[in-house]
Amino acid sequence: MKVPMRYVNDADGNVQAVQVPVEDWNELVGKLRHYEQLLKLRSTLSTALDQVARMRSGKLRKRTLKDVLREA
């Protein structure tokens, strides 16, 4: 995705801001939200798989479905 950008500089030539067309901005924000959701899901799955491994090794108490549903 190639996004046309304009840079806003101060009197010394330092970049102070970036201007992006609204359509492109909305698309970027949508992609960011999507990636945030994927990252959250990955973290949750990683935690769950770690718990399963700990349960199998006996380091964590196994829970029944009733226990899990009671917590929800």
Image: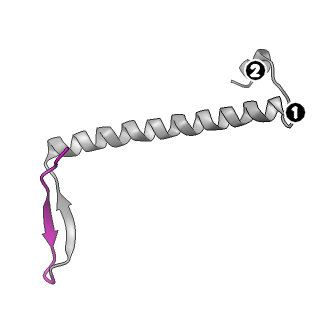
Q: Is residue 45 placed above or below 4 in the rendered structure?
A: above
- In the rendered view, does 32 fall on the left or right side of 3? right
Task: Judge whether 29 appears above or below 61 on screen.
Answer: below
* Residue labelled with disc 2: 70
Q: Give the residue furthest to the top.
A: 66
In this image, 71 relative to 34: left or right?
right
Q: Residues within 10 Å of mark 1 (few under 14, many from 20)?
A: few
Residue carrying label 1:
58
Q: Main secondary structure of the magenta part?
A: loop
- Magenta part of the chain: 1-12
Q: Position of residue 52 (x, y in %)?
A: 74, 30
Amino acid type of the residue that numbered disc 2 sits on in the rendered structure:
Arg
Q: Quadrant of the N terminus?
A: top left
Between discs 2 and 1, the one toward the N terminus = 1
On residue 22, the disc is none
Q: Position of residue 35 (x, y in %)?
A: 40, 40
Q: Is residue 61 left or right of residue 69?
A: right
Which amino acid does the dot numbered 1 rest on? Gly
Q: Residue at x 30, y 38 (%)?
A: 30
- Residue at screen point 79% across, 21% down: 67
Image height check: is 25 above or below 46?
A: below
